[in-house]
Image (tube, rainbow, N blue to C red):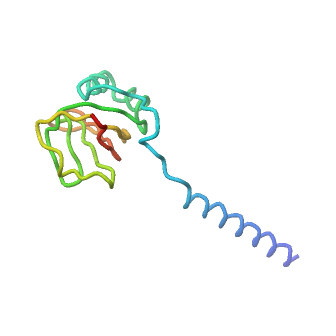
Amino acid sequence: MTKKILLILLVLAIGGAVVGYYMWNKPHRDIQSEEPTYTGTASDLIAILNEGATQFDSLYKEEVAVISGNITQVGETNITLDNIVICAADSTVDVSMFQRGTDLTIKGRIVGTEEDLIEGYIIRVDKFKPLDQ
């Protein structure tokens, strides 16, 4: 009886290890090769958000988007488009090459929205890369 219990525990442990290894090493999502769910300007995206944050999240959260806008702020690892869309760069992008006041089109993943006391809502995008223009 003890041998059967030990055998069952061993099989469960091996099965758990295999599943854990697969989950840990699964391939990453390639955002740049995916088709975008949204293509347009940051201003239009904000207008959609202002119609309803819950509906916006259900449509665009975790989805790929191509967004055009004016760079209003440049940080060490991110930029801001039209004061509302905060974009965190992909690890291969050098953010220092961007200049405030220039127009830019990016492709990235919409992480979600946050309420801001000054701006109302802000949209977070990560893993962005600029599109060749």
- Residue at x 61%, y 62% (from the top left corner): 20
Q: Position of residue 126 (x, y in %)?
A: 33, 45
Quadrant of the rendering where the N terminus is positioned: bottom right
Which residue, as the protein is rendered here, is positioned at the far bottom? 2
Residue 93 higher or lower than 109, as above or below: below
- Residue 9 is left or right of residue 122, and the answer is right
Query: 80 and 50: which one is in front?
Result: 80
Measured from the top left, where is residue 16 in percent x and y? 67, 64
Q: Residue 30: x and y, percent?
A: 46, 46
Q: Identify which residue, 38 or 123, lies in the foreground.
A: 38
In the picture, the quarter occupied by the C terminus is top left
Q: Is residue 82 or residue 103 the one in the foreground?
A: 103
Nearest to the observer: residue 87 or residue 111 = 87
Please report the residue visible at 65 percent of the width from the left and 67 percent of the height from the top: 17
User: Is 27 on the left or on the right of 91, as rendered?
Assistant: right
**Residue for point 34% across, 32% down:** 66
Q: Residue at x 46, y 40 (%)?
A: 33
Looking at the image, residue 26 lies above or below residue 79: below
